[in-house]
Image: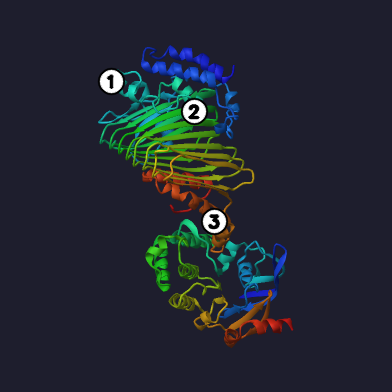
Amino acid sequence: MDLKEKLISSFMAFENNVDVEHPVHDIRTEAIKNFETKGFPSKKEEAWKYTSLNSLQKIDFSIFPKEDNALEYKDVKRYSIHEIDTYKIVFIDGIYSSYLSETTHDGVDICLMSSALTKPMYRQVIDVYFNKVASKDESLTTLNTAFSREGAYIYIPKNKMPKKPVEILHFATGNEASLLLQPRNLVIVEENAEVQIIERHQSLTTNEVLTNSVTEIFAAESAIVDYYKIQNDANTASLIDNTYINQKSKSNVNVHTFSFGGKLTRNNLNFYQNGEYMDSTMKGVTILGEKQHVDHHTLVHHIEPNCESHQDYKGIYGENSTGVFNGKIIVDKIAQKTNAFQQNNNILVSDKATINTKPQLEIFADDVKCSHGCTIGQLDEDALFYMQSRGIPKKEARALLMYAFANNVLESVRIPEVKGRINKLIAKKLGVNLGFDL
Amino acid sequence: MLEIKDLHASVEDKEILKGINLEVKAGEVHAIMGPNGSGKSTLASVIAGKEEFEVTKGSVSLEGEDLEEVAPEERAHKGVFLSFQYPVEIPGVSVTNFMKTAINESRKAKGLEDMPAKDMLKLIREKSELLEIDRKFLSRSLNEGFSGGEKKRNEIFQMAMLEPKVAILDETDSGLDIDALRIVANGVNKLKSKDNAVIVITHYQRLLDYIVPDFVHVLHNGKIVKSGGKELAMELEEKGYDWIKQEATV
C-alpha cells in the first residue's frame, strides 16, 4: 500500500478519536476528499519541479504515534532558547508533553490546538479563524487539515503582549521506525497586540520522520508578529512547512527561516495583505552540505494599496546539497503604491551543489515599486586574497566572507538570544570559531 | 631583506614580468615608477603571493627565505604587507573586527595567545590617531562606501597595526587630495625605521616629496630599465617616460 492509500484508509480510524459532530469535522472530511483527488504533488507540477517527494512516499510511515514516549528536560534543553525564559509548547512524537511545556491563560492563550478544537469556550474563535487562510486545494495543506487535531494555539487579545516569547518544539524520539507528524498551529494576534514565536522540529535519532505542518497566522490591525523558524534537523528528518498569513492594515509580520539541515525541507510561506499600510518581511539564511535539500517557496499577495513587502534570502550551498528559491509576488490592479522588494543571493562552495532560483512577479497595478534580484556566485577571489594578504588564512577568510554574507539577515532578528544562537549555528556549520559576533 | 632575482611572471600565459632584479635592504625606501602597463602592480601582487600570477623563473626571498611555496597569509605573518591600489570592499565585517582577526591569526601562527581585548583597543586607538581616523569609522564595514582617500588611509592604518618588515604601497597616492596625502605620508614616515623597508609604487613625483626614496627604479615592459637616486624621479616628472622608452628600445 502506498502512502496515499494508507493515509486515506487511516482517516476512518482517525474519525473514531475525534468529535465528528464538531463543525471542524466537516472541514476535515472536505479536505480528505480533496487529498484523495489530488494526491501528493509530483515533479510534473511547476511548483514541485525541483523537489521530489517520491522516495518519501515509499517509506512505511506510522500515521498515529504511540502515546507513551517521554523525554527528560536535560536531553532536549539544548534545542530550546534556554538562555531566556519562554513559554513552551512541546510535543513528543506529536503528543503534547505537559511535563516539558509551559502554557498560559493569563490574559493571553498559549495552549493546545486539541483544546481549542474541542472545548466550547474556543468555539467562536475556531469558527471565525480555523482553516480560513490555509489553502483549500493545495494537497499537502488539505492532508494536514484532514488530520488536524493537535498543535499550538496562540490567541493574543487586543493591546496585549505575552510576558515572554513562545517556543513551539517538536521532538521525534525514534520509537517508531518511521513516523509521520502533522501538527496544526493557529496564531491569532488581535488589534495592536504583539507576539514572538520560535518554532523548531527536531528528530533525536536516525529513524525517518516526515512532518507536514500547517500554521495559520492572523495579524489584526497594527498587530506585530515575529516568527523564527529554526531548521537544523537530522539527515533522516524531512519537513514540509506550510505557513499562511492573513494581515490587516498597519500590521507588521516578520518571518525568519534558518535552514541548516534536514534531509528534505520545503517551506511554503504565503502572505495575504488584506489592508493598507502594512509590512511583510521574509528573511532566510540557508547553509547546507551533504545531500541536504531545501526549497523555499514564498508568495506575497498585495491585495490593497500602500503596502510593503521585503524578502531577503541568502544561501550557501556546499557538497552535494541542493536549494530552490521561488519567490512569487502578486500585485493586484487596485494595489497602487505597493513597494515590493525581493532579493535572493547564493554562493556555491562546491562544484556538485545546485541552486535553482526564480523570481515570479505578477504586477497588475501601474504605480508600484517592485524590485527583484537573484545572484549565484562563488566567493570573491579578490576579497579572499585581500584578507589573506592581511594574514587571515584562506579557510578563515572564506568563513568570514560567508559569515558576513549572511549577516544582514540577522540584523532584523529582534531577540538577542535567538540571534546569538543563530550566530553559533552558522559558525558551527561553517566549521570555524571567529571569536566575535558580527 | 627582500631580494628579487631574475623574476619572470605570467598571467594566463602572457608574460608580464620579464626578469626583475631588485634588492631592498632594511631601513631603505625604494620607489618604483613607470608608465601604465609596465608591470608595477603585477610585481606588487607577485611579492604578496597572488596565485593568479605564475612565477615562471627566478625568485623572491625575504630574509634569505624563498617565498615561492609560501601562501599569502604566511607571507603576511613573515612581514610582507601590500597596500592595495584598489582595496576590496567587505560588507558585514567592520574595520575593527577585521583587524582583530588579522592580528590574532598572525599571533596564532607564531604560537601566541590572542591579544587581550584591552591591549587591542589601545593599539587601535593609538594607530587610528596616527592616521587621524575617526573612531566611528572603525565600526563601519571594511571599505564599504569609503571614499578613495578613506580607503587609502585605511590601508596605511592596517599597515600601522600589522607593523610589517616590508611594506609595498601600490599607488597609495592615487585618489588622495593634498591633505590626505600629507596624513598618509606622515603615517608612513612615522612607521619607517632602520629595521623595515618600504617600496613605493607610483606614477608621479608628488608622493615622493613626502616619502623620500633612497632609490628610484623605472619599470618598463616588465623590466627595470633604469635605477638612480631621488633625482631620477624629478627628471621623470620633468621629461615624462618617453625618453626612457626610447633608451630601452635602443
Q: Residue at x 54, y 37 (%)?
A: A294
Q: What amino acid is at disc 3?
A: Ala
Numbered mark located on residue A397 in the image? 3
Pick whichever of labels 2 and 1 is earlier in the sequence: 1
The quadrant in which the C terminus of chain B is found is bottom right
Work out how far the residue at label 1 is from the one at label 3, CA to CA, in angstroms: 58 Å
Q: Nearer the viewer, mark 1 or mark 3?
A: 1
Task: For label 1, count other residues whose C-alpha is less than 10 Å away and answer few (under 14), some (14-19) or many (20+).
Answer: few
Chain name for mark 2: A
Chain name for mark 3: A
Q: Nearer the viewer, residue A300 or B202?
A: A300
Work out how far the residue at label 2 is from the one at label 1, CA to CA, in angstroms: 29 Å
Q: Nearer the viewer, mark 2 or mark 3?
A: 2
Q: Which residue is mark 1?
A: A121
How was this image coloured?
A: rainbow
Q: Nearer the viewer, mark 2 or mark 1?
A: 1
The quadrant in which the N terminus of chain B is found is bottom right
Element at label 3 = helix
Q: In the rendered view, tell whether residue A95 sits above or below residue A253.
A: above
Image quadrant assignment for residue B166: bottom right
Work out how far the residue at label 2 is from the one at label 3, CA to CA, in angstroms: 37 Å
Numbered mark located on residue A211 in the image? 2
Chain name for mark 1: A
